[in-house]
Amino acid sequence: MVVIKRGIIREGEYKGWRVEVDFDESDTGGYYIYIIKSPTEGYDLWCKDMPLVNGELEEFDVKWE
């Protein structure tokens, strides 16, 4: 997988959590969004294309690197 975006959530319930968007070219051809609090706490979402990724990320106020 290739990381295409990284950032930190600035506001809301997940404030301080990291966000990472990865392109899964070899397996699914889609994108994974990882919302990470710690190495043992977080979740992920899978999206088939970037418009869906952008839609999922609209609910978060992210400061991108």
Image (tube, rainbow, N blue to C red):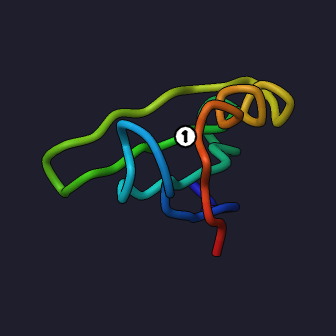
- Name the residue at 56% across, 64% down: 7
Q: How many marks?
A: 1
The residue that disc 1 covers is 33
SS label for mark 1? strand
Snapshot quadrant of residue 30? top right
On-image quarter of the N terminus: bottom right
- Name the residue at 42% across, 58% down: 18
| Left or right side of 45 for 30 | right
Q: Residue furthest right?
A: 51
At label 1, the amino acid type is: Ile
Snapshot quadrant of residue 25? top right
Asked if residue 40 is positioned above or below residue 10 in the image, the reply reads: above
- Name the residue at 13% across, 48% down: 40
Crowd band around label 1 with a 10 angstrom C-alpha radius: few (<14), some (14–19), many (20+): many
Asked if residue 40 is positioned above or below residue 54 in the image, the reply reads: below
Nearest the viewer among 65 and 26 is 65
